[in-house]
Image (cartoon, rainbow, N blue to C red):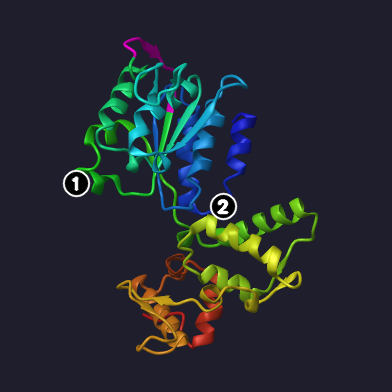
Amino acid sequence: MNKHLQDAVAMIVGESEALQAAVDVACRVARSGSLTSLLIEGETGVGKELFARLVHAGSRRTANDPFIAMNCGAITRDLFGSELFGHVAGAFTGASRDGKPGVFELANGGVLSLDEIGELPLEIQPFLLRVLEERVVHRIGDSRGRPLDVRLVASTNRDLKQEIAAGRFRRDLYYRIGAVSITVPPLRKRGEDVLLLVEHFNRQIATAAGEDPLEFSQEVRDALLAYHWPGNVRELKNLIGRLHVLARGRDIGLHDLPGEIAAPSATSDDGKTLSAESPGGTLVEAERQAMKNALAAEGGNLSRVARRLGISRPTLYRKLDQYGIRRGFL
């Protein structure tokens, strides 16, 4: 593994099995000699761009190989063609007087990352497919083709198969960009990676500010492990940054956390949320029932129960003792 690829892998913090499987596939794509495209799927905030940069790091042949990123969700519908493929002078009203290269040309020799590719308008998709098939781009208004040597990394937080069924995404384009695909797992399914990320961001922010790292109590660690993290790694990073700014001391207790993290809701197997205000009972009762449901669903296998609940085994043991649940409960 080259130094650039090692550094890129080190930026992806976590030891969970699902995350490491995604890293392994991305490394294989990066090291392959072909220009195989990669599709990265995952919820908002899971860190999809880090995987795109990993592919770039492993694909680099020279120090100047470009990495160009474009967020398809941030481009107006009328400008997609120009942004992707470029245009010549006078190609349309408002076109640059000297013409303009698109992101494919800018990424020539390197990696083009198209984030939120599910936002790509349907009428543009055939042209993207043609560029990927022919490895040639035509600027808008120009009959001359420009050869390309570009690896595409596409990412999305949408289910593209559902988009295909709804007629919003082309099946042939999906199979072209998704020849190899990975799913970056949400933070709630990564277990103790949460604590690794807490320490990573804690040290990173403290070093940048020239301060000592924060100290987190065991109750805070348990709360962070139990929280659902709808915003994933981005939400966690923002929380640690907020604590560095607003906490009155270096020791962080439950009172320093937002209410939804300090006293999270419990979720039943049918996806319904139970909270202290829910008709079904108190938060303690809801959490106890959630643990009993998980034990029954996993046949009493505590390792799988901990993964299902997104907590560590020591935390699971402590909670079982706290609620008086026998470890052999079925």
User: Which image quadrant: the C terminus?
Assistant: bottom left
Using the image, determine if residue 48 lies above or below residue 239. above
Using the image, determine if residue 162 lies above or below residue 55. below
Is residue 150 rendered magenta in the image? yes
Residue 229, percent across and down? 49, 64
User: Which image quadrant: the N terminus?
Assistant: top right
Residue 244, percent across and down? 70, 63
- Helix, strand, or loop for circle 1? helix
The picture quadrant where one finds residue 225 is: bottom right
The picture quadrant where one finds residue 182 is: top left
Please tell me which residue lies in front, 313 or 327: 313
Q: Given the current orientation, which residue lies at the most extreme top position?
A: 144
Kind of residue sitting beneath label 1: Ala
Residue receiving disc 2: 14
Is residue 21 rendered magenta in the image? no
Please tell me which residue lies in front, 196 or 265: 265
Q: Residues within 10 Å of mark 1 (few under 14, many from 20)?
A: few
Using the image, determine if residue 178 lies above or below residue 230. above
Residue receiving disc 1: 165
Residue 310, percent across and down? 48, 66
Q: Residues within 10 Å of mark 2 (few under 14, many from 20)?
A: many
Question: Do the CB atoms of the residues marked 2 and 1 lie less than 8 Å apart?
Answer: no
Kind of residue sitting beneath label 2: Gly
Q: Residue at x 50, y 33 (%)?
A: 55
Is residue 312 in view from this perspective?
A: no
Q: Residue at x 53, y 42 (%)?
A: 50
Q: Residue at x 47, y 45 (%)?
A: 48
Q: Given the current orientation, which residue lies at the most extreme front position?
A: 93
Give the mark nearer the N terminus: 2 vs 1.
2
Per the rendered image, the range of residues in magenta is 142-151
